[in-house]
Image (cartoon, rainbow, N blue to C red):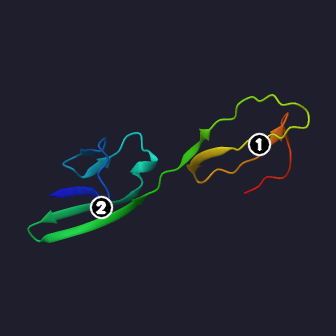
Amino acid sequence: TISWKKVNGHNPSKARLRKSQAVLEIPNVQLEDAGMYECKAENSRGRNVFRGQLQVYTYPQWVEKLNDTELDSGEQLRWECKATGKPRPTYRWLKNGVPLWPQVH
């Protein structure tokens, strides 16, 4: 017999097993699907286990979006970019397509 499991977590509900459970499929992989997975094969002679690490990478997604702002001359503007993603996003400020200063990591 062959069995699959996510180590230290729950198997994704969307996970499917194919070909007598020998193939694990996870459609539309998301960050929460990342982790260590284990496949166990057993027969009358014993068992063997294989583990594999799934890393999931995503494009930046805004946590908070900037709003257009009107200020009087002399007032202070404070905008903060907040985004998630893997690897962690870097930020760069531009004015009319021109960088305000060198890129910060």
Q: Is residue 8 above or below residue 74?
A: below
- SS class, disc 2: strand
Read off the residue under disc 2.
38
Whole-percent x, y for residue 42 in the image: 15, 64
Classify the position of the N terminus by image quarter.
bottom left
In which image quadrant can residue 37 be found? bottom left
- SS class, disc 1: loop
The residue lying at 86 percent from left, 37 percent from top is 75
The residue lying at 21 percent from left, 56 percent from top is 3
Q: Is residue 102 left or right of residue 30?
A: right
Whole-percent x, y for residue 6 in the image: 31, 57
Whole-percent x, y for residue 13 in the image: 29, 43
Amino acid type for the residue under numbered disc 1: Arg
Q: Is residue 87 left or right of residue 29?
A: right
In which image quadrant can residue 51 be found? bottom left
The residue lying at 14 percent from left, 71 percent from top is 46
Which of pointers 2 and 1 indicates the residue nearer the eye? 1
Q: Nearer the viewer, residue 14 or 77?
A: 77
Q: Nearer the viewer, residue 1 or 59?
A: 59
Whole-percent x, y for residue 101 in the image: 86, 50
Amino acid type for the residue under numbered disc 2: Glu
Answer few, some or many: residues within 10 Å of disc 1's Cα (few below 14, many 20 plus, some between 14 and 19): few
Read off the residue under disc 1.
78
Q: Which residue occupies the extreme bottom position in the image?
A: 45
Q: Earlier in the sequence, mark 2 or mark 1?
A: 2
Mark linked to residue 62? none
